[in-house]
Amino acid sequence: MKPVKSVTIIDDPQVHEDQHVHAVYDQIASHFSSTRYKPWPIIAKFLSDLPTGWIGLDSGTGNGKYLPLPADRPGSILTIGLDRSRNLLQIAQHAGSEPGILITREVVWGDVLGSGWRSGVFDYAISIATIHHLASHDRRKLAVQVRATFFQTQGPSLIRHDLQRLVEAISPVHGRTIIYVWAIEQDELSKRSIPAGDTDGSDHYPTAGEDVFVPWVMSQQQHTAKGKFKGDITSSATSKQDVASAVSTLAVETPVYNRYYHMFAKGELKQLTVQAAEELGLIVGPRETAYTKGCRGVEIIQEGWERSNYYVELRRWVS
């Protein structure tokens, strides 16, 4: 297993993401998808609890494994998948299909910080293992504002006009969202060991997240399927010894792709969410905290840590 390495971002965050996130996932899409097939239980329950007829967004859908849910009543809600990787979207478009039964899902190619949604179109949104790929605090905060905080029609100056349509896309009355990000605190089943950062000196938790490269090593089968060296082995190998040598060369040259992640520290996701909501002029708390009629707010329904991930669930309200 290749080690996780700390990284310092010195170039433009968008350029960093283009090189170490978007380009990587287009290269590893098929292999990556084969390892991502089981939904997280808390996310599955979130989708299962939504009212029949709701329409929502899976922002950063990947291979679309959440698009067929809820499993207990398929088709009762409609989740539209959005992703930057065209190769992953080709897989997501038919998520949940079985041999002889081709199912077509609604998917859109786009950036999670982009615009394009008309006002009020979504009842809910999910963001699973996506925000941690954004390479600055402001971009991660903006992603929360864009997809989660359910928003006033007129936001502060942080939200520019090109984001206004997406800001308005979630219902300000009943909108719900759940966000998952990778955690510095990995469990015993994790293959990753995160480099230690600064701690607060009391409970030894890091005071901030860590920017890291998490390597993705292509499997031998996937690498040969891409045709990198397959032809060389069949055309030039004339003996068993030549074949063994070619296979050895193939193993040595199997590529490793470094994916950028911001690994979240304890409390960081909640803090980011609260900051994003307050900058939008929203009250953070239950509806009962409203001081007058017509106040707009967002309530944190639950937050926690699950299997090396932090998560937060939010609900929008108007008094």
Image: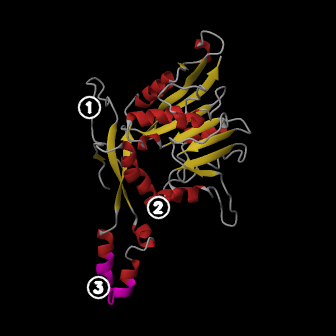
Query: Which amino acid type is shown beneath numbered disc 2?
Result: His
Determine if residue 42 is in view: yes
Left or right position of 148 against 141: right
Mark 1 or 3: the one toward you:
1
Mark positioned earlier in the residue sequence (1 or 2): 2
Q: Which mark is residue 155?
A: none
Report, in whole angstroms, how far the alpha carbon at label 1 lies from the one at label 3: 52 Å
10 Å crowding of disc 3: few (<14), some (14-19), many (20+): few
Look at mark 1 in the image and give the residue it sits on: 198
Q: Is-magenta flag for residue 232?
A: no
Q: Main SS of the magenta segment?
A: helix
Q: Is-magenta flag for residue 235?
A: yes
Check the picture and name the quadrant holding the N terminus. bottom left
User: Could you say whether the residue bearing mark 3 is in a helix, strand or loop?
Assistant: helix
Left or right position of 202 against 167: left
What are the residue bounds of the magenta stretch? 234-247
User: Could you say whether the residue bearing mark 2 is in a helix, strand or loop?
Assistant: helix
Report, in whole angstroms, how far the alpha carbon at label 1 lies from the one at label 2: 35 Å
Residue extending farthest to the top is: 291
